[in-house]
């Protein structure tokens, strides 16, 4: 709504044209917002007027005719080994959460996945960690029904969290290994080979884990330090 109301709020729904939307997308990007933000607005506009079409208020959804903002894949520049070691050393000096950073950096977990880990997901004997839960952004409701506080639910002094702290991840997330890593180790020439033989990667996961551990922590082990 932040972009929709100022951008097209003055237009009647039945007078809204694809060109109005395309100008809105361009304006969003000129303001410094990313193409992803403009594309999110486009997706919202594709979905919302469909209800008006279904009810007969308009005959067509202008967003389905408008040209969507072009999304380009940003080139990701990962940290090198020395940078990861420096980050881990800095994290180790923190009063808390150093393990969270170590796990996230070494395994490539998302923030929610790292925060959603529990001891039940870890098998120290086998050296296996399964990503089964992900931390959710909390949602709140008012707890001051007898005397409204006048604030938003998240700032209510008696707020009540209405969603669970964590949610299930997709089943494949807990067994995620970058396809490029598997292909490089196995010598597969294309993603088709990876798709065909991906079922044999349990042993590869342990091989990759040992290699990553050796790269990140080998120097400290050799010097007698422990993280």
Image (cartoon, rainbow, N blue to C red):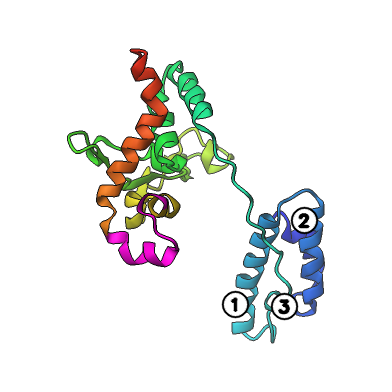
Query: Mainly helix, strand or loop, the magenta region?
Result: helix
Q: Is residue 55 left or right of residue 144?
A: right
Outermost left residue:
125
Q: Earlier in the sequence, mark 3 or mark 2?
A: 2
> Is residue 173 part of the magenta span, yes or no?
no
Residue of label 3: 62
Residue 227 in view here = no
User: Closest to the observer: 203 or 145?
Assistant: 203
Mark 3 lies on a secondary structure that is helix
Q: Where residue 162 sits: x, y (%)?
A: 41, 47
Magenta part of the chain: 184-199
Residue 24 versus residue 77: which sits nearer the camera?
A: 77
Query: Eyeballing the image, is 38 above or below 202?
Result: below
Taking the spot 38% from the left edge, 27% from the top edge, the residue there is 99
Please rate how many residues cluster around mark 1, counting C-alpha atoms within 10 Å: few if below 14, some from 14 to 19, many from 20. Answer: few
**Residue 195 x %, y %:** 37, 65
Label 2, on which residue? 28
Give how far apart the Cα atoms at labels 3 and 2 are: 18 Å
For residue 20, which quarter of the picture?
Answer: bottom right
How far across and how far down the image is residue 197, in percent? 31, 63
Residue 73 position, x and y percent, is 63, 56
Q: Give the quadrant of the C terminus.
A: top left
Locate residue 200 relative to residue 16 in the image: left or right.
Answer: left
Left or right: 87, with 38 as reference point: left
Residue designated by label 1:
51
**Vertical relation: 210 (above or below) 69:** above
Image point 30% across, 42% down: which residue? Answer: 207
Above or below — where is 12 with respect to 91? Answer: below
Which mark sits nearer the N-terminus, 2 or 1? 2
């Amino acid at each position: 709504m932040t972009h929709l109301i100022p951008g097209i709020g003055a237009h009647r729904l039945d007078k809204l044209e694809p060109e109005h939307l395309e100008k809105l997308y361009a304006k969003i990007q000129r303001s410094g917002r990313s193409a992803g933000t403009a594309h999110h607005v486009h997706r919202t506009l594709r979905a919302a007027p469909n209800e008006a079409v279904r009810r007969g208020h308009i005959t067509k959804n202008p967003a389905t005719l408008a040209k969507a903002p072009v999304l380009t894949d940003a080139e990701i520049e990962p940290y090198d080994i020395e940078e990861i070691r420096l980050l881990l050393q800095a994290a180790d000096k923190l009063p808390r959460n150093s393990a969270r950073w170590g796990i996230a950096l070494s395994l490539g977990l998302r923030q929610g996945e790292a925060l959603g880990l529990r001891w039940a997901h870890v098998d120290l004997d086998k050296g296996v960690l399964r990503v089964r839960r992900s931390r959710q952004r909390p949602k709140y409701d008012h707890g001051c029904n007898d005397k409204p506080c006048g604030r938003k639910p998240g700032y209510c002094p008696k707020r009540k969290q209405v969603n669970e702290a964590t949610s299930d991840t997709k089943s494949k997330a807990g067994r995620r290994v970058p396809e490029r890593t598997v292909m490089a180790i196995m010598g597969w020439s294309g993603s088709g080979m990876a798709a065909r033989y991906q079922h044999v990667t349990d042993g590869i996961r342990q091989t990759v884990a040992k290699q990553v551990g050796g790269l990140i922590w080998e120097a400290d082990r050799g010097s007698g330090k422990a993280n």
